[in-house]
Each structure stands twice: as structure tokens, then as C-alpha cells.
């Protein structure tokens, strides 16, 4: 399917303008939600323009885009906002794949191949706006003479730019007077910094939309070559059985010693050393197991013994995931919560869901593993983002770590406005006390900059960047 330069160019300009208005020096607030609404509207126009039929799940994807946009309105956590921008890109690509391709019969490798081609294929179309413009000029030129003249002028400009740059530099060094005149001329040319930034964003938005759509429709209905399960199952049975035996032995030790040990640590170990020593290795093994099971499931021919072997590996991975989560919980009980520790627990939950999907697919042929993974991945992120990690991190640390104990005041001081409820409530509680300890005074003085930052963020908000989390935190602060 070919794109139409005359209709695609105006929409690319509209996209570039709206993209710049929403995101220029702005990462959160109402503008991001409005951009999500705009993405749905421009997608509807695009699909109608190229007569792509609607599908039942369209509204679910569009609702997901709106939920991602709204999340940027109700959170001030820059980590969530950063992830949110990435997820919006991924979700829009998933929506376009769903709408433009009949992917129901694809397996996960096929889907990922097409997904990556849509995500990065636009780079190969970077010259498409210029080439399409030249085609239009060639077609609409009244005479061959006019067409040749236009092409000649454009080619001449392209050739002249690098030549002028080189010879001007050489002549500036050859003659001091000429060099002084050129330098003075360049210094007198002042371009506002904001104008440069806005121009770059406009160009980026234009090429992003134009090249992305061109790449999408250049591969429209060109399905990836379906891979057949042609691998010899005996090979997979052999190595998965040996791997499963090691995992089974490890899992037995975990069940008998770790889970039944009632929190007893090996002699000479601290919580920190115990949690750190094995945690990252276990997470790496869990991720490897997921990839191993998925690879065997899609590459090797079906065999009942292979199914059993993969089920054993998956079951042992459940135990490893539980062991990783248990170690992290031990660490949290000793040292409190941080964003990274919370994020790791959520990732372990995602690994659990991933394993559950592959186990179901092993025994139920009609189970759509790819659709299940899409729901799990995006649903998992929405739950994580909307849970406001900073909010319960601050609440947990303030409730479980006494001011006199291990509370990391400086970490609290760097948290987003999402944590304002817990932090400002503690400040209000301490301000009402007449007799404060040294640590409590340190808490008040240290978190004063946190309160000041919220006031400044609230004062600097405009319509585009209006954020409910900051607005609500400012109201709480005014009641302090």
C-alpha cells in the first residue's frame, strides 16, 4: 500500500505542531493526555483514509492509550513519567499492528520481528519525504524543461552547501581580513535558542509521523515468514531434562531450607549480604528459563516428554521466582523500600505471569500465548504506574522505620510529589510536638527543601503542565 504525499504531508505537519506544543519543555500534565487523545483521533483518520477495516479490540487499545496519557496527569514521579513515554510508543505500535495485520496466527518470534520492524523501520524511510516530493514535482511539472530545471536547481543547492562550507573555511585562514569579516558576520547572526529547539522538535515530529506511516504501509499485509516447529524433540528433551534435574535439586533445597527455615540465615550472614549474594543471579536464571522454554516451545516439534520437561523447568522457575521475591522481602524488612526494590518485585510478578502463560500454552493448543502476553505486559505496567510507587514507599518507610532508626531522610527528600501525603503528614505531626529529638529536627530541616520544591513546581505549572499530584501536594502543604 502506497502513501499519498499530498494528504500525508499536511497531517505530518499537524502532528509535528501538536507534538511540539504538548512536549516542548514539558514531560507531564494535561498536555500529555491531550496528545493521547490526538493520537487516537489521527489514528482513526489514518485508518479511514487508507480504508483499513475496524476490529473488535480497537477500543481497548484506544482506551489503553488514554489511560497511559492520563497517568502522566496524576503522577509527578519522573521515573514513571519516563517509563510512560516509552510505553505509549510501544502501545501505539501494538495498536497499529493489531489494526493493520491479521496477527492472530503469529507466534511470539513473528510478532516481535514485525514489531521491531515497525519501531525501527522508519529510520530506513528517512529520505521518503524528499523523494516523495521530487516524485510529485516530476509528475506535476508541465514540461520536461521545467522538470529538469527544478531538479537541476535542487541538485545544485545540495552540491553547493558542502563546497561553500569548505572553501569559506580555507579562505578565512588564507586571508586575515576576510576571516575577520566572516567571523564578525557569523557572530552578528543570532538565532534564539528556543527557536532552534522548537524547530528541531517540529522537524522530529514531522519525520517521525511521515516516515513511520510510510514504513507501516510499505509492509502492510506482508506477513513474516511463518516458522515451523522443525527441531528434533529428542535434542530438546535431552538438554532440558539435564537442566531440569539441576533446577529440581536447587528447588528442593530452597523449599527445605529457605522457605521452611523460618527466616533463619546462614551463620555469619547479614540480611544485606544474603539478599544481594543470590538475588541477581536468580533473577538472571529466571529470565533465561523463560526464554529457554519459549524457544523450545516454538522451535522443536511437539512431544509429550518434552512437555513434561518444560513443565518441570517452569515449575522450578516458579520456586526460583519465589526465592528471589523472598530474598528481596528480607532485604526490604531490614533496609526499607526504594523504587528499584519495588520495581524488581513487580518484574518478578511479571515473570510469574509469563511462566503461567507458557504452561497453559503447553497443554492447551488453542491458547493464544501472544495475546496473553500483550495483556499481561501492558496491564502489568498500568497497574504498576497507577499504584503510585512513591506514595506507598514513603508510607512504608515512615511507618516501619522510626525517625530514630534507619530512616533514609535524604531519599525521602528526593521523592516526587506523589509521596507528599505521607511526608507532609509526618512533618505536620512533628510540628505539633513540643519536644523533638535531634533526628526529628533533622527530618524537619531536611524535608523543608522537599516542601519548597513542591511550592515551586506548583507555581510554575501552566495549562500544559498542570499535574494533579503536584496540585494536591500543594494543597496539603498549605494546610501544614
Image: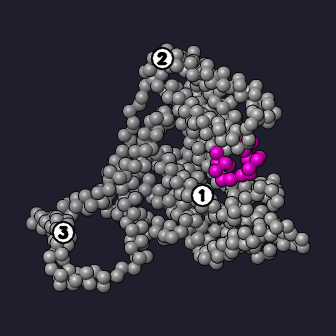
- The region drawn magenta spans 328-344
Q: Nearer the viewer, mark 2 or mark 3?
A: 3
Q: Position of residue 311 (x, y in %)?
A: 62, 23
Can residue 367 be spotted in the picture?
no
Query: Of marks 2 and 1, which one's residue comes earlier in the chain?
Result: 1
Label 1: element kind: helix
Look at the numbered disc 2 and give the secondary structure of its residue. helix
Residue 16 lies left or right of residue 270; in this view the side is left
Instruction: Based on the picture, tell me whether residue 448 belongs to the magenta stretch.
Output: no
Which numbered marker is on residue 79? Answer: 1
Number of on-image labels = 3
Number of residues whose C-alpha sits closer than 10 Å to that of mark 1, classed few (under 14), some (14–19) or many (20 or more): few
* N-terminal label among 2 and 3: 3
- State yes or no: residue 331 in magenta: yes
**In x, y percent, where is residue 128?**
29, 56
Q: Name the residue beneath numbered marker 3.
A: 166
Q: Secondary structure at mark 3?
A: helix
Q: Residue under circle 2? A: 235
Q: CA distance from mark 3 to mark 1?
A: 45 Å
Amino acid at each position: 500500500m502506497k502513501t499519498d504525499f499530498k494528504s500525508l504531508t499536511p497531517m505530518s505537519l499537524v502532528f509535528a505542531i501538536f507534538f511540539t506544543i504538548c512536549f516542548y519543555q514539558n514531560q507531564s500534565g494535561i498536555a500529555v493526555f491531550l496528545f493521547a487523545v490526538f493520537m487516537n483521533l489521527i489514528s482513526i483518520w489514518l485508518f479511514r483514509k487508507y480504508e483499513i477495516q475496524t476490529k473488535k479490540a480497537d477500543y481497548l487499545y484506544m482506551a489503553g492509550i488514554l489511560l497511559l496519557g492520563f497517568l502522566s496527569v496524576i503522577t509527578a514521579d519522573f521515573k514513571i513519567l519516563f517509563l510512560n513515554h516509552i510505553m505509549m510508543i510501544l502501545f501505539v505500535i501494538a495498536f497499529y499492528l493489531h489494526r493493520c495485520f491479521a496477527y492472530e496466527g503469529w507466534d511470539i518470534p513473528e510478532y516481535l520481528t514485525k514489531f521491531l520492524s515497525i519501531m525501527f523501520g522508519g529510520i530506513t524511510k528517512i529520505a521518503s519525504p524528499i523523494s516523495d516530493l521530487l516524485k510529485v514535482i516530476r509528475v506535476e511539472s508541465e514540461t520536461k524543461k521545467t522538470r529538469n530545471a527544478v531538479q537541476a536547481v535542487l541538485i545544485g543547492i545540495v552540491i553547493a552547501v558542502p563546497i561553500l562550507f569548505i572553501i569559506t573555511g580555507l579562505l578565512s585562514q588564507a586571508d586575515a581580513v576576510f576571516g575577520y569579516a566572516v567571523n564578525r558576520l557569523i557572530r552578528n547572526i543570532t538565532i534564539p535558542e528556543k527557536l532552534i529547539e522548537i524547530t528541531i522538535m517540529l522537524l522530529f515530529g514531522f519525520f517521525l509521523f511521515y516516515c513511520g506511516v510510510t514504513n507501516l504501509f510499505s509492509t502492510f499485509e506482508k506477513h513474516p515468514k511463518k516458522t515451523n516447529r522443525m527441531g528434533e524433540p529428542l535434542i530438546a528433551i535431552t538438554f532440558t531434562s539435564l537442566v531440569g534435574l539441576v533446577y529440581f535439586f536447587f528447588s528442593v533445597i530452597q523449599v527445605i531450607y529457605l522457605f521452611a527455615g523460618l527466616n533463619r540465615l546462614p551463620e555469619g550472614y547479614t540480611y544485606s549480604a544474603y539478599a544481594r549474594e543470590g538475588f541477581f543471579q536468580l533473577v538472571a536464571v529466571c529470565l533465561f528459563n523463560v526464554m529457554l522454554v519459549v524457544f523450545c516451545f516454538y522451535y522443536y516439534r511437539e512431544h509429550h516428554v518434552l512437555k513434561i520437561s518444560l513443565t518441570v523447568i517452569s515449575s522450578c522457575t516458579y520456586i526460583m521466582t519465589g526465592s528471589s521475591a523472598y530474598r528481596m522481602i528480607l532485604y526490604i524488612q531490614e533496609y526499607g523500600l526504594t523504587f528499584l526494590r519495588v520495581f524488581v518485585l513487580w518484574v518478578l510478578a511479571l515473570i510469574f505471569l509469563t511462566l503461567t502463560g507458557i504452561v497453559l500454552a503447553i497443554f492447551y493448543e488453542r491458547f493464544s500465548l501472544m495475546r496473553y502476553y500483550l495483556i499481561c505486559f501492558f496491564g502489568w505496567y498500568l497497574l504498576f504506574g497507577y499504584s503510585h510507587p512513591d506514595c506507598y514507599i514513603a508510607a512504608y518507610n515512615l511507618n516501619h522505620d522510626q525517625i530514630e532508626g534507619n530512616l533514609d531522610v535524604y531519599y525521602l527528600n528526593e521523592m516526587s510529589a506523589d509521596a507528599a501525603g505521607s511526608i507532609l503528614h509526618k512533618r505536620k505531626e512533628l510540628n505539633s510536638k513540643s519536644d523533638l529529638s535531634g533526628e526529628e529536627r533533622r527530618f524537619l530541616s531536611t524535608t523543608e527543601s522537599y516542601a519548597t520544591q513542591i511550592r515551586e513546581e506548583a507555581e510554575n505549572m501552566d495549562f500544559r503542565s498542570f499535574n494533579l499530584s503536584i496540585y494536591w501536594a500543594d494543597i496539603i502543604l498549605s494546610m501544614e
